[in-house]
Image (cartoon, rainbow, N blue to C red):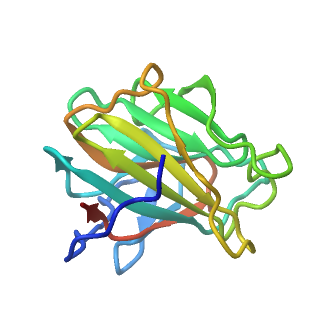
Amino acid sequence: MESPRTPRSPRLQTAWEQTEDYEVSADRKTATKTMFGYEAGIVTEGELEGEGTFTWTFTIGKTAFEDAHLFVGVADMVDEMAWGFSPPTGSLYHHADKDRWGRETHVRVYAGPSGHALYGNMPGSKVTVIADLTNHNLAFQIHPAGQEQPDDIFEVPVKDCELPDRIKPWAFLGHVGDSVTISDITSVL
């Protein structure tokens, strides 16, 4: 997949929904896992629907472990399914319920130069999500911490993820203290 096209303006304001399991920062951009409860996943307030390609970036803040059970991606707002990229494994996971642990799809989205994805190098790394709602495709671009340029874009095969018509940015943080910050959403031409 080529680099995302030219962004339109303005950006769509993004804010995390308030939930029992997460503390949301005053600017509503950073979510920190505070407890283990029913709402293990967190989504943004606004839905994306219709046609077009939308991008947003997750910046990984803190992780309790090098192999943190942290997933970032999208949630289906009709069936509450989710598709998440796991930075330490580089794999795509499919979650039948956005608030429950998912199963690995055995699709390695990203191996990284060492073959170990972002294992041990997550804090400060960025994961850009590219959601093409016109073609129902999902792609990710990884920018490891300390690396000057991001890596290539990895498109998820349609057999492993066909996006629905309505989605929200989504994250699932596995450990208390884990945190992630989301950028505003950009619509691209």
Q: Quadrant of the C terminus?
A: bottom left
In the rendered image, the residue lying farthest to the right is: 114
Can I make out residue 23 in this image?
A: yes
User: Image quadrant of residue 16?
Assistant: bottom left
Give the image location of residue 162, x and y in percent. 35, 27
Front residue of 77/117: it is 117
Residue depicted at x 71% and y 70%: 145
Left or right, 179 with respect to 144, comes to left
Give the image location of residue 165, x and y in percent. 19, 35
Left or right, 74 with respect to 1, comes to left
User: Image quadrant of residue 185?
Assistant: bottom left
Residue depicted at x 28% and y 52%: 53
In the rendered image, the residue lying farthest to the bottom is: 26
Can I make out residue 39 in this image?
A: no
Q: Does 94 appear above or below 19?
A: above
Give the image location of residue 81, x and y in percent. 36, 29
Left or right, 129 with respect to 107, comes to left
Residue depicted at x 56% and y 63%: 179
Front residue of 65/143: it is 143
Give the image location of residue 96, x and y in percent. 41, 23
In the rendered image, the residue lying farthest to the left is: 50
